[in-house]
Amino acid sequence: MEQFLQMSGAMAFPPAGATELAEFERSSGLSLPDELRELYSTCNGLEIEYLGLRFLPLHEVMEYAHFFQNALGLFPLTDENDSDPYAVCCRGPLQGWVVHVRHDGDSSLDFRNVGAFVKAIENLSPDDDYPKIRAELVERPRVRSEADVAVGLATLQMARKMEDDFAGWAIRFGLSLLTENELPEFVRIFDMNWMTRRTSLEELAKIPHPSAAKTIADYREEISEFSHTAARALKAASLDVSAVGANTITLQPGPVHLNMEAWYDRRGSDDFLKTIVEYARNAIAGKPRPSEGVK
């Protein structure tokens, strides 16, 4: 850590003592991983001016209390002047891993530990025109160890039991650690709901293997046929179908857009076609209806 402070030109704050660390853990409910404890025992926050990057002191970390109370137990580590912090997982299978929290995009699992995150910062230079922290886990070609896969599978198992907004994060993080050898896990995520299916497809697309590409193609073909079957039922009911897209059916007047990814979740229902026709009629008439299925 001392070497990192020298190489990065960081301005370090005085270290947190054992009493301060214990009080933080008591107040936050988090148990700090060893690397994180070592970092704050060396300096309770720091600033790297040329990156516009701050490691938050403990009293500022407490301002993000809403990150603590979930199965991931996120500890917001940095502030880059853009409200998209890096955070360290303090609970569950991902304990010690570093995620990049994005408010205007998908959060991602970027580093296996704090040491790898620090090393990525060390590799930057004030002489770089646009210094940018390069995530360890976006390397090409994609490389995942047996240990990575085991953590990914355990994270998915945990995510299935979560009932808060962070469940979607855990699903994305878990899938990002899998390979083409775990395709059945991606398919299981397909069957949870349309949002997790979209996440699964996005993560599958990052695996450069024919089996992953075939799984995506098979789904695209299946939902296309599903949408056209629904469109034929809507037309048979004398509804004006103006367009049938890959994931959307558009009806007039309105227009009303039916989200077929959401309706796909009901594909096993015996009265699916009757239900979507009734739903579409109500949507065109402007009658109150559940938001699911319309976008």
Image: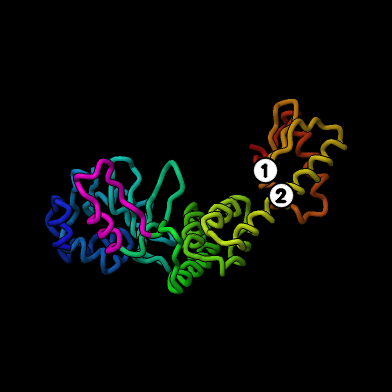
Mark 2 secondary-structure assignment: helix
Q: Determine which quarter of the picture holds residue 281.
A: top right
Image coordinates for residue 64, horizontal then vertical, percent: 33, 49
Q: Say which amino acid is labelled 2.
A: Ile
Q: Which residues are magenta?
A: 114-136
Q: CA distance from mark 1 to mark 2?
A: 7 Å
Residue 91's image quarter? bottom left
State the residue at coordinates (77%, 48%). 225
Q: In the rendered view, does 70 fall on the left or right side of 5?
A: right
List x then y, in percent, for residue 16: 16, 60
Instruction: In this rendered view, identify the residue nearer to me: 101 or 8.
Output: 8
Residue under pointer 2: 223
Residue that appears at 26% across and 66% down: 35
Q: What residue does disc 1 label?
A: 247
Mark 2 is surrounded, within 10 Å at the Cα level, by few (under 14), some (14 to 19) or many (20 or more) other residues, namely: some
Tell me whether circle 1 and circle 2 mark residues in contact (CB < 8 Å). yes
Which quarter shows the N terminus? bottom left
Q: In the rendered view, does 268 fall on the left or right side of 80?
A: right
In terms of sequence position, does the residue under pointer 1 or pointer 2 come before the other?
2
Question: Crowding near pointer 1: few (<14 within 10 Å), some, many (20+)?
Answer: some
Q: Residue at x 41, y 56 (%)?
A: 138
User: What residue do we see at 14% from left, 59% from top?
Assistant: 15
Q: Give the residue type at disc 1.
A: Asn
